Amino acid sequence: MLDRADSLAPETRKLELSTVMVEPQLSRVLKRIDDMKGKSQATYGNIVVHTPRVDLTRNGAVVRDCQDSSNAGLLDTRTQKKLNRGVKERNIKALLEKGAEGRWRVSKFIVLGEGC
């Protein structure tokens, strides 16, 4: 859902994203989408996820991933010209919380850098 978060209908975007994330990540993503729309930018492509490690903690879980975003990036919505492209290996860490109903949601997403 995150690859297409900016294409979700504005009136349902927050509700739809709240199925996979909680604060503070939810507000960060919504603000980023507003910033992109203000600059006539949108995302394109898909990110390939490779989750090599999940650690359960007392307060939730930590997911480590080596994402391939080389076929995704930002484009100018006026010209459809690609502005940038992701990288083959993007090392990330995501903190997750488990809701009362048992569903896991991202509370924080951290890009650790290129290479895994």
Image: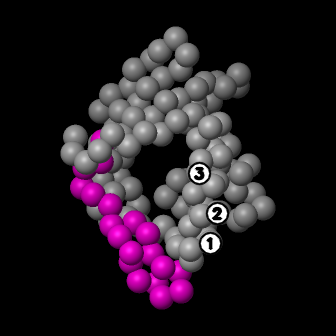
Reply above or below: 57 against 78: above
Give the mark nearest the N terminus, 3 or 1: 3
Task: Nearest to the eye among marks 3 and 1: give it.
Answer: 1
Q: Residues within 10 Å of mark 3 (few under 14, many from 20)?
A: some
Q: Residue at x 49, y 58 (%)?
A: 3
Q: Is residue 67 left or right of residue 25?
A: left
The residue singled out by tag 3 in the image is: 29
Give the mark nearest the N terminus, 3 or 2: 3
Tell me the colour scheme of the image. one colour
Question: From mark 3 to mark 1, how far is it between C-alphas?
Answer: 14 Å
Q: Is residue 21 left or right of residue 47?
A: right
- The image position of residue 79, as x and y in percent, is 48, 88
As shown in the figure, which amino acid type bears the numbered disc 2? Asp
Q: Which numbered marker is on residue 38?
A: 1
As shown in the figure, which amino acid type bears the numbered disc 1? Gly
The residue singled out by tag 2 in the image is: 34
Q: Secondary structure at mark 2?
A: helix
Q: Is residue 116 left or right of residue 9?
A: left
Q: In which quadrant will I find the C terminus? A: top left
Question: From mark 2 to mark 1, how far is it between C-alphas?
Answer: 6 Å
Q: What stretch of residues is rendered in magenta? A: 73-91
Outermost residue toward the top in this view: 58
Q: Nearer the viewer, residue 54 or 87?
A: 87
Q: Which numbered marker is on residue 2?
A: none
